[in-house]
Amino acid sequence: MDLLGYCDVILELLSDIIELTLLNCNVPITFVEKLGDFVAQHKINLSFLNVSGIDLNGVGQLMDTCIHTIPVLQLAGCNLNDDDFTSWSRAIRERNTNMDLLNLSYNVLSQNALENLAPSVHQLDGWLLHRCSISGDGLKQLCHEILKRQKPMNVFSLKNNNIGLIGVSEVSTCVHNIRQLWLDNCNLTGTCLKPFLLAILKLDHQMETFSIGGNKVGSEIIPMLAKCVHKSKRLDLDNCGMNADEVKIVTNETKFQDEPMTFLALSKNKFGDEGAIALTGCLNKVEVLDLRNCDITSVGAKALWEANLKWKREIWGLDSEFEEASETSASSDEMAPVVTNLKKKRCQIS
């Protein structure tokens, strides 16, 4: 949307806005600079700012003045460069309070950019880095800083980055200091995952979320992966190439949970009715079960439905009603790892 004629109006209304979204909008560079200065000078209490999709290449640093105060900042797909990242890293480190979430997804982060941003993780409680062309070598300094955090990082997501063996090895060094970890579609094989899963199984606590959807893990790693149900309240194994026998292994481990898992995702694994019937034995240990696109026919669906009469669990993918509900709940890829409780006035323009 073209906002050239509305920039001054937005600034005038800013003091009454708690959330501002300017998604994929055409705004002049001068407005970007004014927005940052206005928020900083007038101590505007913005709790959420989303300028994703706006080309901020080379000018993103003009917003560093407002980074000191905004808890949630969405900058996905803004064509940012190394100078922008360096400027923001410095501004984030000067904050008096931690940011709840910084989303830099769909921006290319070089190894130099990651190394410059790494020290800022001490003031970041949540960081989304989806599809940022991050390689394994670039994660060494970043993971080293996460390791040194005094409190665990709430959210760390590297979805859709080809980090491979080197990258996942670096993440394994700091996994105990991350509450929610997302490594979907990161080109992780069983060989990559084995030392990483060993690190998770050594944890003396449960993670909130562990997600490795979209990685073809291989049958040899499934017994070790299944034991992760004891180390994460939410486990996402979407599209991991699992068959019915492998789902049975996960099911058998889930049965021994002390407390029910909040969420178990097995969607897009083609285990069919045999796997669905096996899952009926662990419904008492899973609050929400995602079974979308698993080749389950009416036979498997009926078995799950009958078993669920007692437990009343939420199962996605059994019929059109469940499918519609689950698609609505899981539609936002970028905001999936974190939920913010923001209830005041919102302004969204896209």
Image (cartoon, rainbow, N blue to C red):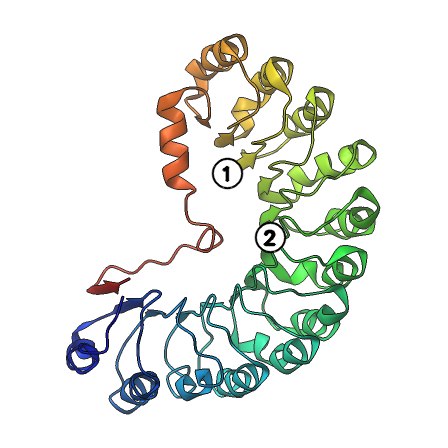
What is the distance, in whole Å, between disc 2 and disc 1 at their CAs?
16 Å
Give the side of residue 21 with respect to residue 164, left or right. Answer: left
Secondary structure at numbered mark 1: loop
Q: Which of 262 and 41 lies nearest the eye of the viewer?
A: 41
Q: Which of 237 and 230 lies nearest the eye of the viewer?
A: 237
Give the side of residue 134 with respect to residue 264, left or right. Answer: right
Q: Which of 49 and 97 lies nearest the eye of the viewer?
A: 49
Residue that badge 2 annotates: 182
Residue 245 in view of the camera = yes
Q: Residue at x 65, y 76 (%)?
A: 114
Give the side of residue 249 with respect to residue 269, left or right. Answer: right
Dot 2 amino acid type:
Trp
Is the Cβ of the residue at disc 2 closer than 8 Å to that at disc 1? no
Secondary structure at numbered mark 2: strand
Q: Quarter of the image for the C terminus: give it.
A: bottom left
Q: Quadrant of residue 141?
A: bottom right
Estimate the x, y position of residue 134 in percent, counting from the top left: 67, 65
Closer to the chain start, of discs 2 and 1, is 2
Q: Which mark is residue 335?
A: none
Estimate the x, y position of residue 7 in percent, counting from the top left: 21, 80
Q: Quadrant of residue 133?
A: bottom right
Q: Quadrant of residue 138?
A: bottom right
Q: Residue at x 41, y 44 (%)?
A: 331
Estimate the x, y position of residue 143 in percent, counting from the top left: 70, 69
Q: Residue at x 75, y 61 (%)?
A: 167
Residue 261 in view of the camera = no
Q: Quarter of the image for the N terminus: give it.
A: bottom left
Q: Which mark is residue 262?
A: 1
Give the side of residue 148 with respect to residue 19, left or right. Answer: right
Q: Quick one: label 2, few (<14), some, or many (20+) residues within 10 Å?
A: many
Dot 1 amino acid type:
Thr
